[in-house]
Amino acid sequence: MDDLMKIKLLLLIDDDKQDKLLGLIKEDTEARLVSYMNQDGGILKTVPDDLSWVVRELVIQRFNRIGDEGKKSSTESDVTTTWDTDDLVQYDVYFKQYRNKVGGKGIARLI
């Protein structure tokens, strides 16, 4: 089962009406993750397979936030939803471990 099918299953979507939107969100999410993980000089071109679950979770979060962009919270009846201002923060521990594995901690030179 590919990632799009897994995302749709988690969102309980059983048609193809949202496929283009979910594909765009997935593409943007992957680009953000690659950019983030390359901050320390890495040369990743794609998100590592062992972090594909993070991509799925971030896509679902972004999809569920459509219509509430820019808000920190939303209330409907008795239900309040609050979002982090940076949705990558909750997964930072996984990214740091990978970034350290790929990019190291840099080089210090004494002159």
Image (cartoon, rainbow, N blue to C red):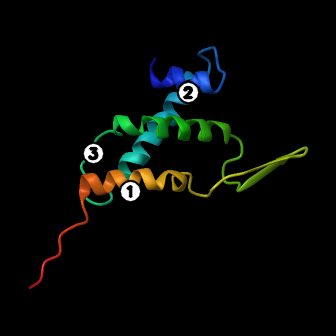
Q: Could you give the CA–CA distance between mark 1 and mark 3, rounded to whole angstroms?
A: 14 Å
Q: Outermost residue, bottom direction?
A: 111
Residue 90's spot in the image, x, y percent? 54, 53
> For the residue labelled by badge 2, is the local secondary structure a helix, a strand or a loop?
helix
Q: Earlier in the sequence, mark 1 or mark 3?
A: 3
Task: From this view, report whether residue 41 is shown above or below residue 58.
Answer: below
Residue on which disc 2 sits: 7
Q: Residues within 10 Å of mark 3 (few under 14, many from 20)?
A: some
Tell me: 34 left or right of 106: right
Q: Are marks 3 and 2 in contact (CB under 8 Å)?
A: no
Numbered badge on residue 8 = none
Tell me: 67 left or right of 98: right
Residue at x 61%, y 58% (from the top left corner): 85
Residue at x 71%, y 54% (from the top left corner): 71
Numbered badge on residue 96 = 1
| Closer to viewer: mark 2 or mark 1 | 1
Residue 14's spot in the image, x, y percent? 64, 15
Numbered badge on residue 44 = 3
Q: Please state, as top left, top right, bottom left or bottom right, where the C terminus lies in the image.
A: bottom left
Q: Outermost residue, left direction?
A: 111
Q: Residues within 10 Å of mark 1 (few under 14, many from 20)?
A: few
Residue type (three-letter) at the residue carrying disc 2? Ile
Q: Could you give the CA–CA distance between mark 2 and mark 1, rounded to whole angstroms?
A: 25 Å
Residue 78's spot in the image, x, y percent? 90, 46
Residue type (three-letter) at the residue carrying disc 1? Lys
> For the residue labelled by badge 3, is the local secondary structure a helix, a strand or a loop?
loop
Q: Could you give the CA–CA distance between mark 3 and mark 2, rounded to whole angstroms?
A: 24 Å
Q: Quadrant of residue 8?
A: top right
Residue at x 32%, y 54% (from the top left corner): 99
Q: Earlier in the sequence, mark 3 or mark 2?
A: 2
Residue type (three-letter) at the residue carrying disc 3? Leu
Q: Earlier in the sequence, mark 2 or mark 1?
A: 2
